[in-house]
Image (spheres, grey):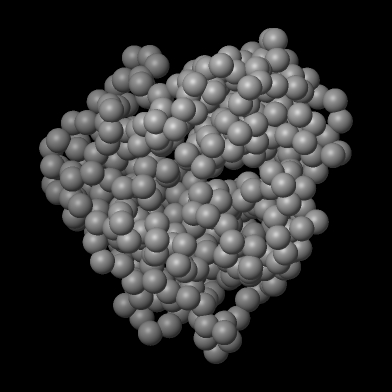
Amino acid sequence: MGMTITEKILAAHAGLDRVSPGDLINARVDVALGNDITAPIAIKKFRESGATRVYDKNRVILVPDHFVPNKDIASAMQAQILREFARDQDLTYFFDAGEMGVEHALLPEKGLVLPGDLVIGADSHTCTYGGLGAFSTGVGSTDLAAAMVTGEVWLKVPETIRFIYTGALGPWVEGKDLILFTIGDIGVDGALYRSMEFTGPAIEALGMAGRLTMANMAIEAGGKNGIIAPDAVTETFVSERAVRPYTPYHSDSDAEYVQVIEYDVSKIEPQVAFPHLPENTRGISEVGDISIDQAVIGSCTNGRIEDLRSAAAVLKGRKAAKGVRLIVIPTTPAVYRSAVEEGLFEVFMDAGAIIGPPTCGPCLGGHMGILAKGERAVATTNRNFVGRMGHPESEVYLANPAVAAASAVLGRVGGPNEL
């Protein structure tokens, strides 16, 4: 019996010929990642362990991206802990100030996560890097501390669900819609502690931005990781960025899956996830009349240059409806610069948008876009839990960038076709 791509990566990093679902392993870590919320705890535990140096200053990466530019004294203190630790440990990759971007967009852009890698991060959306063909998963801050000391992580090998996407995408349908549809089908616990392997012609036709978006939201289905086998699209993206050698892996033809699920994407329209769970999805034609107060385009899910282009294509020559706050947040300085050079900012500003610096911003109720009681937002983010973007009596509707842009113009949740 062969192995899946996830099993092959885990076996290689555990120094084993093969692994099977349920096996408990210690595996070598290629990248250990922390941010300004989770890393301070990990740093505290690192010091309590008696360790004096991280296992590899090139493999421990810190990105303060959640509450930056710092919104208050408490967040400033959190970031200060990272700065001092990075300086003390002489970390090669600490991104601050003008270099800082949203971690899960920044690391692939910088070539720091690569096909075949094993990546852990003290952030649940670390699973994003599966879009590159890496095994990546979120861990707790104490697990991050242990990895910073030893360079290893303890894992149980997950079972794998294979998702096959056939057909051609319709107008304004993106990777975000495929993953929202999938979560709507299997539920927020439908892949609990399982690897979600995304395959098929429709996946092969997706650009890297769409692949990263799909892997990003594997955790919203309870997945241990999401992963897409590397191909020519991956190689084109990675070859000009990679900071070190890498080894791509692919599933064997006789690999064993706990479940195989197939979707015809030609039957999927743009999706909207209603409050308060990502599984509460409806096609855009079934949304109804839902007025909004805010539209947010950004986050580690959908703030890349491709996402901004999609939103700008809808907003060009149009304005946000009166009373709707349109917030656009590029994920990295490079995305920000590209948006300026391509004239996207002019489109956004003409539409009445507020453009923020690269940061997580309102996605987690951080800052620069918090919702008040009773307010509604449509957002390209990944979660719409109670109070996720602000007041516990506010509501968040998840959608792709084109739908978020169209909704801003319409003043209600709606799609580009209505314009």
Assign the C terminus to one quadrant of the image: top right
Residue lying at 28% horizontally and 28% vertically, measured from the top left: 98
How many numbered discs, if any? 0
Say left or right for 394 vs 74: right
Q: Position of residue 24 (x, y in %)?
A: 44, 71
Left or right: 49 as drawn, with respect to 27: left
Q: Is residue 394 visible?
A: no
Q: Which sits in the foreground, 316 or 378?
A: 316
Establish if 409 lies above or below 88: above
Q: Is residue 168 visible?
A: yes
Toward the top, the furthest residue is: 322
Horizontal and vertical percent position of residue 162: 63, 70
Q: Residue at x 30, y 54 (%)?
A: 241
Q: Where is residue 236 drawn, in percent x and y?
A: 40, 61
Q: Nearer the viewer, residue 210 or 416?
A: 416
Q: Position of residue 311 (x, y in %)?
A: 59, 33
Q: Residue at x 25, y 53 (%)?
A: 59
Q: Is residue 13 above or below residue 280?
A: below
Quadrant including the N terminus: bottom right
Between residue 51 and residue 208, name the one nearer to us: 208
Residue depicted at x 80% and y 43%: 283
Would you say 322 lies left or right of 349 here? right
Q: Quadrant of residue 45?
A: top left
